[in-house]
Image (tube, rainbow, N blue to C red):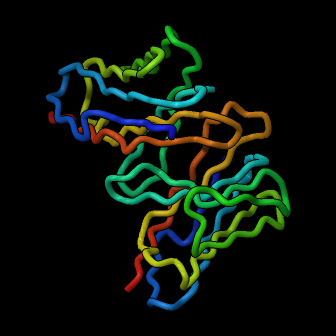
Amino acid sequence: DGGITQSPKYLFRKEGQNVTLSCEQNLNHDAMYWYRQDPGQGLRLIYYSQIVNDFQKGDIAEGYSVSREKKESFPLTVTSAQKNPTAFYLCASTPEGGTGELFFGEGSRLTVL
Amino acid sequence: EDQVTQSPEALRLQEGESSSLNCSYTVSGLRGLFWYRQDPGKGPEFLFTLYSAGEEKEKERLKATLTKKESFLHITAPKPEDSATYLCAVHVFYQKVTFGTGTKLQVIP
């Protein structure tokens, strides 16, 4: 079955540590996205990528980094510079020329201890 | 600034009690309005896309409508399995999608 796989589902991190969240898709979609979801707030865009080896900052990119070395993979690194990293992180994708509807993974919940 | 406001924040219904969720928006140019369903601890699941005022779409007990300022998600005779958070989002340009904060629906048997 086609879809988006995020791992790990739950992750605990000590302050000062970097952590990388994995996102893999087998939908052959060109565009991939990372969103952050906090209670009482709408989803906020962290980074997005239209094609391999290219990505753009979203609304809240500070303290995060991404790479897009393969079409199917778009990992997100939460660095120690991110002041409030505890959140639910969602990866999504859309096909090239799509109408904008997003296909989401199951999410990764990061907790900083 | 583009804004999407959903109301109510939470809604509790008895099974079979129909109701509507609201999504009002202020954007510079609407390319599409989306409704998603999100279960606790899961990623959002796409429901509908609406493109122009007057458009309606249906899926089982759900019906989405769109005007120039707002969208409604009508739930007819809901069942407990309809309990979830319903998210509204607007597609403004290229990759800009703005989400509302959602309406948490609880359907009591």
Occupied quadrant, residue B67: top left
Q: Position of residue B97 (x, y in %)?
A: 58, 41
Q: Residue at x 83, y 53 (%)?
A: A51
Where does residue B9 sit, x and y in percent of width and height? Answer: 25, 40
Specify the farthest residue to the top: B54
In the rendered image, the vertical position of residue B89 relative to residue B41, given as above or below? above
B86 shown above or below A33: above
- Please tell me which residue lies in front, A85 or B12: A85
Identify the residue at horizontal 39%, vertical 28% (top origin): B24
Q: Give the total number of marks visible in the rendering.
A: 0
Q: How far across and down, in percent of the image, does residue A43 sit?
A: 47, 51
Residue found 31% across the figure and 22% down from its top: B75
For the C terminus of chain A, give its image quadrant: bottom left
Q: Is A11 on the left or on the right of B84, as rendered?
A: right
On screen, residue A39 above or below B108 = below
In front here: B17 or A76?
A76
Task: Name the side, left or right, on which A107 lies relative to A103.
Answer: left
Residue closest to the eye, A59 or B50: A59
Left-right relation of A105 to B106: right
In the depicted structure, whether residue A31 falls above or below residue A63: above
Q: Position of residue A91 (x, y in %)?
A: 59, 57
Q: Residue at x 54, y 85 (%)?
A: A80
